[in-house]
Amino acid sequence: MVGHRFSAPEITWRKTVRRPSVGEFIEGVAGRFVTDLLRRGKYLIAPLDDDQFLVLHLGMTGSLRIHDARRDPPPMVRHIFPLDDGREMRFIDPRKFGHLWLLPDPADAMRKMGAEPLEPDFTVAVLAAALTSRRSPIKAVLLDQSVIAGLGNLYADEALFLSGIHPERSANGLTDQELPSLHDAIVRALSTSVAAYAAARDAEWPDPPVALSPWSVPRSAAELCPKCQGSVQMIRVRGRSSWYCPTCQPAG
Ligand SMILES: [Zn+2]
């Protein structure tokens, strides 16, 4: 996308466009160059050459493809952004949970966001400070984007499994040994997945997989814990499915 010019996008599910109006969005994107591609938490940000920002959120099931425009579109393409070189960006969104914005400040699309876990300023001290006043289950706090930006349900389960912490432990009850271990596990869970996705994207371009399962904690009762060979369990923490090993992640 970077260095290419959009012509008028086709928006087929109007509710995806949060701001401005659909008409203003189409008019504002048409003819603009994409100057860069950034990310904050789960938001993708494309700065345009008129100092506006195209902001995308893929929702639970959304994905983007850059395809030759002559190629048949895959199912569930909701929005098409034609580029100036015969390709187009296709926003695939089966459940229509994705969102689009065109804004002078990308922060206006987002709620308050916490530290970026793969940036150097995400330290053990930053994590400890974010958890210190929180009595909620650690799993729920890890999913709070104002604590750590971009951590999703499966990544939080993996980080808790790697660090041996039960998902329902109180966030402010973690020990001085567990905090660095959790910090390390968050970074490892994300880095491992990012590397797996990058390799799959390169290998299968222009149709990279939408989902991979690079987890060590099984997400099925039919599989055993890779550490202790015991049974894993699923519980719901604040409504979110949470897989863990009762032996390796004791309730404390
Ligand atoms: Zn185990």
Image: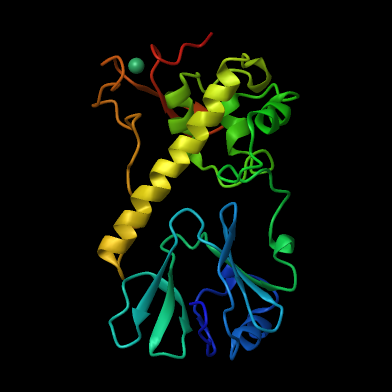
Dividing the image into four quarters, tell me where ligand 1 lies.
Answer: top left
Q: Nearer the viewer, residue 174 or 97?
A: 174
Residue 63: where, in percent of width, then height?
A: 42, 63
Vertical side of 83 occupied by 126: above or below: above
- Residue drawn at 51 percent across, 11 percent down: 251
Which residue occupies the extreme front position in the image?
Answer: 120
User: Count of labels shown?
Assistant: 0
Q: Nearer the viewer, residue 5 or 231?
A: 5
- Residue drawn at 69 percent across, 28 percent down: 125
The quadrant of the rendering that contains the C terminus is top right
Vertical side of 246 occupied by 31: above or below: below
Q: Nearer the viewer, residue 36 or 97?
A: 36
Vertical side of 237 occupied by 35: above or below: below
Q: Is residue 206 left or right of residue 141?
A: left
Residue 237: where, in percent of width, then height?
A: 53, 28
- Residue drawn at 43 percent across, 56 percent down: 61
Residue 14: where, in percent of width, then height?
A: 57, 75
Q: Is residue 109 left or right of residue 232?
A: right
- Residue drawn at 53 percent across, 33 percent down: 239
Residue 213: where, in percent of width, then height?
A: 32, 43
Vertical side of 123 occupied by 173: above or below: above
